[in-house]
């Protein structure tokens, strides 16, 4: 028999993988304490997801009442805002197969990994897999046959670190770079993005009003996520102070936080709702980049020097 999943029922006397010691008071809005029927009726839909990815957790022994499980959810939400839990493998696979605009990270218990992974490994929606169990050596040889499996874990901290790395790669991989030799070859999505950018740059924003609207929208989407809520409050207080002098737009975009994920999501999926909410930030970021480019071109290399930059997604050698 396979080893138990990451969290087992409170009545069980088995040892569980270590999930941390901090106690947290509540769970995210994307995680709901309810029976399986209710959860099936409230799975996160594409328009509710503000990152390019979400996390699925499949374990037949999940017990929502124990602190270790709740602590683990909070720990993982520092990286992935939307977390969907499953005790039924068929329901999990069905939900995964219906994803269209998102990539999924999957945590699966040792008990289920050998039965589930061979049937889903080929799915393009599935970005990476993490086996979370008690006995690490038992599966270390088996996972070598599945390149999407990033490891076998018995503790939540190294598991979270691995998911964090995958999240960064995932965001970078989903940035589309278009090249065309004629107007006939330009992709419609590229043209829409360019048109939207031109419109945004022409709008005379009421900065205070638009920032408040962005903050309110972010609070709604990250409801219950304590760490991101704290960063949203920080953004509301400090973003507009000395905006240009301190390069605030670039600083916030390069920080691993809500505005980075929302902007990437908006540009990748062209979701109008999110694009309108982050419109003022897109304008500020564009102007900030232009300012720095002008300063660096003149101060470091001279006004006529071309600066060459390179950009490309990460590809794992197993895919070749």
Image: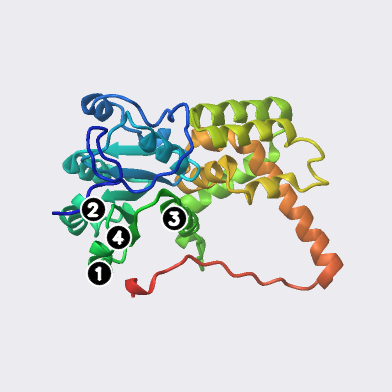
Q: Residue 110 carries which label?
A: 2
Q: What element carries label 1?
A: loop
Q: Which mark is residue 141?
A: 1
Q: What element carries label 3?
A: helix
Verify CB contact (< 8 Å) between mark 2 and mark 4: no
Ranked by sequence position, the earlier of labels 2 and 3 is 2
Q: How many labels does the image show?
A: 4
Compared across the picture, whether 306 is left or right of 276 comes to right
Q: How crowded is mark 2: few (under 14 residues within 10 Å), some or many (20 or more)?
A: many
Q: What element carries label 2?
A: helix
Ranked by sequence position, the earlier of labels 4 and 1 is 4
Report the mark closest to the observer, 4 or 3. 4
Q: Position of residue 137 (x, y in %)?
A: 27, 64
- Determine the residue located farthest toward the front in the rendered image: 13
Please, is residue 260 above or below residue 236 in the view?
Answer: below
Quarter holding the N terminus is bottom left
**Residue placed most toward the observer, 137 or 261:** 137
Quarter holding the C terminus is bottom left
Q: Position of residue 239 (x, y in %)?
A: 72, 37
| Residue identifier under label 3 | 158
Q: Residues within 10 Å of mark 1 (few under 14, many from 20)?
A: few
Question: How far apart are the alpha carbons under marks 2 and 3?
Answer: 16 Å
| Residue identifier under label 4 | 136
Verify CB contact (< 8 Å) between mark 2 and mark 3: no
Ranked by sequence position, the earlier of labels 3 and 1 is 1
């Amino acid at each position: 028999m396979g080893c138990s999943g990451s969290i087992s029922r409170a009545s069980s006397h088995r040892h569980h993988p270590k999930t941390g010691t901090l106690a947290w008071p509540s769970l995210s809005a994307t995680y709901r304490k309810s029976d399986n029927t209710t959860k099936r009726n409230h799975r996160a839909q594409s328009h509710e997801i503000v990152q390019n990815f979400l996390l699925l957790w499949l374990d037949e022994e999940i017990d929502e009442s124990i602190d270790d499980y709740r602590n683990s959810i909070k720990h993982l939400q520092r990286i992935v805002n939307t977390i969907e839990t499953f005790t039924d493998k068929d329901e999990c696979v069905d939900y995964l197969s219906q994803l269209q605009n998102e990539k999924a990270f999957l945590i699966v218990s040792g008990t289920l990994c050998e039965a589930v992974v061979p049937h889903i490994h080929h799915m393009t929606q599935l970005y990476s897999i993490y086996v979370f169990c008690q006995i690490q050596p038992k599966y270390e040889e088996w996972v070598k046959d599945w390149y999407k499996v990033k490891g076998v874990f018995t503790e939540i901290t190294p598991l979270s670190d691995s998911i964090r790395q995958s999240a960064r790669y995932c965001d970078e991989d989903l940035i589309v770079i278009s090249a065309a030799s004629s107007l006939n070859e330009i992709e419609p999505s590229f043209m829409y993005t360019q048109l939207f950018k031109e419109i945004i740059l022409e709008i005379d924003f009421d900065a205070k009003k638009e920032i408040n609207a962005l903050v309110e929208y972010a609070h709604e989407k990250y409801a219950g996520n304590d760490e991101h809520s704290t960063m949203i409050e920080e953004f509301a207080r400090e973003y507009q102070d000395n905006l240009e002098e301190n390069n605030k737009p670039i600083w916030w975009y390069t920080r691993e936080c809500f505005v980075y994920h929302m902007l990437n999501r908006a540009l990748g999926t062209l979701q109008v709702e999110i694009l309108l909410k982050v419109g003022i930030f897109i304008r500020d970021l564009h102007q900030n980049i232009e300012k720095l480019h002008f300063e660096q071109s003149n101060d470091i290399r001279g006004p006529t020097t071309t600066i060459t930059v390179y950009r490309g997604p990460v590809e794992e050698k197993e895919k070749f």
